[in-house]
Image: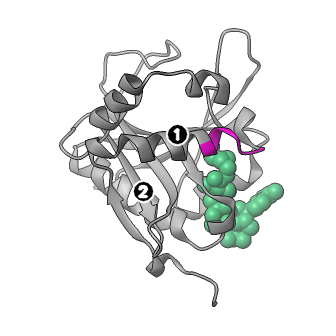
Amino acid sequence: MSTPTSDDYVIRAIRPDEWTSVKQLRLDALRDPVAPIAFLETYEEAVAEPDAFWQERATRSGEGSHTARQFIAEAPDGTWAGTVTVLVEEAGTEDWAGYPIERRQGHVVGVFVRPEHRGTGLIKALFDAGVEWAWQQGVERVRLLVHADNARAQGAYRKVGFGPSGFVVAFSKDAAENELEFVLERRS
Ligand SMILES: CC(C)(COP(=O)(O)OP(=O)(O)OC[C@H]1O[C@@H](n2cnc3c(N)ncnc32)[C@H](O)[C@@H]1OP(=O)(O)O)[C@@H](O)C(=O)NCCC(=O)NCCS
């Protein structure tokens, strides 16, 4: 079989009724060797969550929601090969870590491509969909946080047009400040 390209995948928003697939993809992401520096929650925390948690997550970020949207890349065999989720952060609020939000912006989280689908370009297709959705929501910029040691993710983000803002934060009160903010400004 030839190496797949991004054209071989269907990029689409998840539906709220697809919460079991949302759960499965997230649990697989949390078992990735890079997970400790890529994601806020652990596999143990996520696997202990009740069905209602996943149902609520799929509703909150599924088709029809204007505050968040999860996109997936569906391979020809139906496998969910990768995902990005974009949250809308309102100016004047605080983000999950307590930092003030100064501008209305998109925040990309939960970025994951299954190892066997990496390097195919589908991460760009996922970002194109996520960023386009964010602009449609009227945000001024889109940002994300990436660990200083996560070189592959940083490489992928630079390829899709994001760059460091210079803002560096800690994931939690006890953690070192090693999360780099990358941003993509809206072109008027
Ligand atoms: C991050 C992720 C989504 C990127 O998707 P991907 O398909 O692997 O990305 P790509 O291969 O298209 O792009 C990565 C780029 O970084 C480059 N890269 C890889 N390792 C690198 C390293 N150690 N240093 C610098 N650049 C590196 C790659 O060469 C590639 O650039 P190129 O296409 O110009 O060669 C995927 O690797 C993944 O799911 N990782 C585990 C979870 C994760 O880290 N999520 C991000 C949380 S912030």
**Where does the image place residue 183, in percent across and percent down from the top left?**
50, 44
Left/right placement of residue 152 relative to residue 111 reads right
Image quadrant where residue 158 sits:
bottom right
Q: Nearer the viewer, residue 85 or 164?
A: 85
Q: How many numbered marks are there? A: 2
Quadrant of the image for the N terminus? bottom right
Task: Identify the secondary structure beneath mark 2.
Answer: strand
* Disc 1: which residue: 144
Quarter of the render that holds ligand 1: bottom right
Which stretch is magenta? 28-33
Which marked residue is nearer to the observer: mark 2 or mark 1?
2
Most extreme residue toward the left, as rendered?
A: 64
Mark pair 2, 1: CA separation = 18 Å
* Disc 2: which residue: 72
Taking the spot 70% from the left edge, 38% from the top edge, the residue there is: 35
The dot on residue 75 is: none
Most extreme residue toward the bottom, as rendered?
A: 2
